[in-house]
Image (cartoon, rainbow, N blue to C red):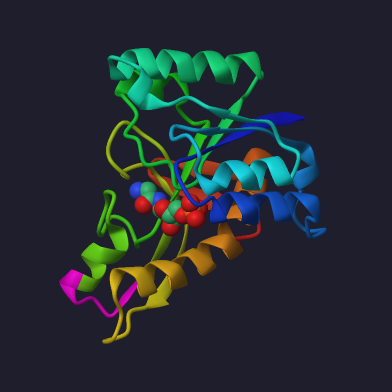
């Protein structure tokens, strides 16, 4: 059984989608081979913590503002993860940049969902940047986390049309709905080992989600 933690910083709607999926996985997806054993937030009091508690998954806060350096924060985060014997990390709206040292420690075992079609619009404002650029299509990307900012190998993507009337908020919320549909499935497949990597190209068994 592969043990994974979900890292959050805010609302936790993707966390909720993951926990709902794990509560009732479709037969084609081997979610039973892994288990969400812990939720960690770097911000206290965020709604995502209540999402974890409602699902009965242990939730911990490692508040980055309580540490004097990124290294000290990450050491505490890593210690929490080790205490729970976590093997994989699933980032779901985790808005803290992780150092290359931390990323190397978890290399190949850390996934993220990003609200844009990478490599377009990396960084913390994916939907706002897409609206400002006037693109007609954006979407979401599930990728491995590497040492760069949203530069890891892409596992799955889904497109979302950008409307002339869109704001960052309206586009972001439509993108989130698509993330909720694809992220849990991709997490389930990857954690079950149903993928292979050839250079930059990740092949999911049975194709995309
Ligand atoms: C999601 O759209 C996720 O892709 C994004 O934050 C949102 C979190 O929503 N992540 C990033 O922008 C990371 N660069 P949630 O807390 O409701 O899951």
Residue at horizontal 32%, vertical 84%? 163
| The quadrant where residue 164 appears | bottom left
Rendered location of residue 110, percent (x, y): 49, 34
- Seen from the viewer's position, the closer of residues 146 and 121 is 121
Rendered location of residue 168, percent (x, y): 30, 69
- Seen from the viewer's position, the closer of residues 34 and 64 is 64
Q: Is residue 173 left or right of residue 121?
A: right
Answer yes or no: is residue 159 visible. Answer: yes
Residue at horizontal 62%, vertical 45%? 50
Q: Quadrant of the N terminus?
A: top right
Task: Write down the region rendered in magenta.
Answer: 132-138
Answer yes or no: is residue 141 visible. Answer: no
Residue at horizontal 52%, vertical 61%? 179
Examine the structure image and report whether residue 177 is included in the region drawn in magenta. no
Q: Is residue 5 left or right of residue 93?
A: right
Tell me: residue 164, above or below residue 63. Answer: below
């Amino acid at each position: 059984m592969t043990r994974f933690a979900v890292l959050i910083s805010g609302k936790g709607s993707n966390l909720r989608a993951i926990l709902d999926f794990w509560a009732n996985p479709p037969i084609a997806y081997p979610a039973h081979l892994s288990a969400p054993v812990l939720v960690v937030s770097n911000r206290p009091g965020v709604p995502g913590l209540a999402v974890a508690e409602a699902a009965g998954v242990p939730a911990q806060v490692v508040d980055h503002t309580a540490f004097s350096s990124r290294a000290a924060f990450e050491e505490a985060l890593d210690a929490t993860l080790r205490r729970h014997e976590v093997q994989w990390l699933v980032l779901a709206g985790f808005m803290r940049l992780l150092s290359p040292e931390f990323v190397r420690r978890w290399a190949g075992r850390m996934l993220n969902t990003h609200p844009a079609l990478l490599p377009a619009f990396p960084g913390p404002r994916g939907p706002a940047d897409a609206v400002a650029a006037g693109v007609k299509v954006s979407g979401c990307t599930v990728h491995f986390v590497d040492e760069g900012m949203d530069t890891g190998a892409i596992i799955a993507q889904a497109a979302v049309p950008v409307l002339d009337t869109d704001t960052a908020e309206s586009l972001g919320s439509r993108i989130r709905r698509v993330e909720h549909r694809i992220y849990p499935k991709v997490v389930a497949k990857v954690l079950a080992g149903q993928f292979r990597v050839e250079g930059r190209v990740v092949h999911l068994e049975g194709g995309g989600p």
